[in-house]
Image (tube, coloured by chain):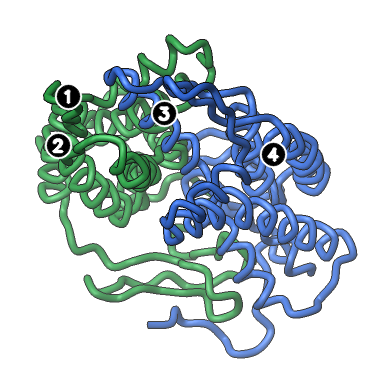
Chain colours: A blue, B green
Amino acid sequence: MRAQASASGVASARSRGLVRCEHCGLVSRIDTEEHCPRCRLAVHSRKPQSLQRTTAWLVVAVVLYIPANVLPVMGTSSVLGESKHTLLGGIVELWETGSWELSLIVFIASIAVPIVKIGALALLAATAAARSRWRQVERARLYRLVETVGYWSMLDVFVVVLLVGMVSFGAFASVTPEDGLLAFGAVVIATMLAASSFDARLIWPD
Amino acid sequence: MREVGAESFPSLVVCAECDAVYARRPLASDEVARCPRCGALLGRGHRLGIDGQLALAVAALIVFAIGNLSALVTLDFRGRETVLTLPEAIAATWQTGEQLVALLALATAIVFPLAVIALRLWLLAPIAFDRRPPAFVPALHALAWVTRWSMAEVFLLGALIAIVRSAGLAEINVGIGLAAYALLTVLLTAEMLTGLHGLWRRAGERPA
C-alpha cells in the first residue's frame, strides 16, 4: 500500500526546514536543533562530505582490488605438491572440474558483484555531484540494489575459512589462506563503507 | 504518546532515501508502505508484538549456541572420522598465520550475530516486563550498527559451497551445526523485519 502523499510537488524535508534523524528516524526542526531530541546524536540535513567520503572509499576499493586478484587467495599442499590459487584461478578450476554452478556463484559473488558495485557507486556519486535529474527513480533503485547485495561478496572469505578447517583435520592435504584473501575482504568492506557514506538524498536535488 | 521535544514531529515520516515528507498513518499487519516518489521502504505493519519478538530472540540464542557448539560437518576419510565446528575452523585459519582473515570471519559470522541476539534480549526482556531497558538509547544504536555488519547468511552459503567443493576428497556429511545456522538465518531475518521504529518510539517516551 502507498503512503498518503500529494501527487505533485513532493517537498523535501530540507526545503521545509525539517530533518530526519538517520539513526532513529525522528523528524525534527533543523534550525533549532543540532542533535536529535530523542537519540541525542547529531542530525544532518545531508550526510557531511558524503561524495568525498564515497569517492575516497571507492579509490581504496579499486586500489585493493588489484592485489585481491593478483595475489593468491588460497594455497593447497598435498603429497602431489603445492599450489596456490588466485580468485580467477579458483573459479577456472571449479569450472574445469565440472562444478560449473559453483564456479558461476563464486564468479558472481567475487568478481562481478564488486565490479558492478564500484561502477554503480561511481555513477551515483558522479550524477549526484552534477546535481543531475536523469532517471532519478532508476538511480534510487540502483542504490538500493547496491546496499542489499553488497555484503554477499564476503562469500569467498567464508568458503576458504571452512576449507581450511575441513582439511586441517584430515591427513590428506592442507589448505592455507593467502594474502589475496585479506585484500579481497578489505575490498568488500571498502565498498560497503562507500555505499553507506553515499547519501541517497543527493539523487533528488532540491 | 507523549511529545519527545518541542520541535519534533512524530506525526510525520520522511523518506530516508529521497527526503520527501509524508503524514504518518498506522499500518495493518500485512501492509508495507513505500515512498511513492522513489520506492524506498517507509515502514511495515507489525505482525509480532514484543512477546513474539522476545520469543524469536530466545529461540535465536538457543539455535546460535547449537550452531557454534555442534558439528558443521563430519568428515570421513579412510576410516577416520572427524568433526568440525565453526570456532574450530576459525581457529585453524588463525593458526595458518592469516589472523586478520580469521578475525574477519569471527566477527561477521559469530560475534556480530551474537551481539544482535544479545542486544535484542537486553532491550526486549525489560520491555516485556514493563520496565525501561538500561542504556536504552546506546543499546539501540549498537543494535542498528551490529545488525548491519552481521553476515550469518553469507557464512551459510560459503559453508555450503566449501562442502560441495570438497565432496570429492572425502565423505562429508552435513552436521547439526549447519542446519542450526540455516535456521538462525531465518530467525535473524524475521527479527530484522520487525524493524526498530517501535523500540525507538518507546525510547523517546518518558518513563511512567
Both labels 2 and 4 in a single chain? no
Depth check: give the residue in front, B189 or A173: A173
Disc 3 to disc 4, C-alpha distance: 18 Å
Residue at numbered disc 2? B175
User: What mark, if any, has residue A161 been given in the picture?
Assistant: 3
Residue type indicated by callout 4: Asn
Disc 2 to disc 1, C-alpha distance: 8 Å
The residue lying furthest to the bottom in this view is A7
User: What mark, if any, has residue B174 been given in the picture?
Assistant: none
Disc 4 to disc 1, C-alpha distance: 32 Å
User: Which tag, 3 or 4, sits closer to the chain's start?
Assistant: 4
Looking at the rendered structure, the secondary structure element under dot 2 is loop
Residue at numbered disc 1? B83
Indicate the chain on which mark 3 is placed: A
Does residue A86 appear in the picture of this structure?
A: yes
Looking at the rendered structure, the secondary structure element under dot 4 is helix
Looking at the rendered structure, the secondary structure element under dot 3 is helix
Residue at numbered disc 4? A69
**Picture coordinates of residue B137, whole percent (x, y):** 40, 32
Residue type indicated by callout 1: Val
Contact between marks 2 and 1 (CB within 8 A): the answer is yes
Residue found 70% across the figure and 51% down from its top = A198
User: Which tag, 2 or 1, sits closer to the chain's start?
Assistant: 1
Residue type indicated by callout 2: Gly
Crowdedness of circle 3 by 10 Å Cα count: few (<14), some, many (20+)? many
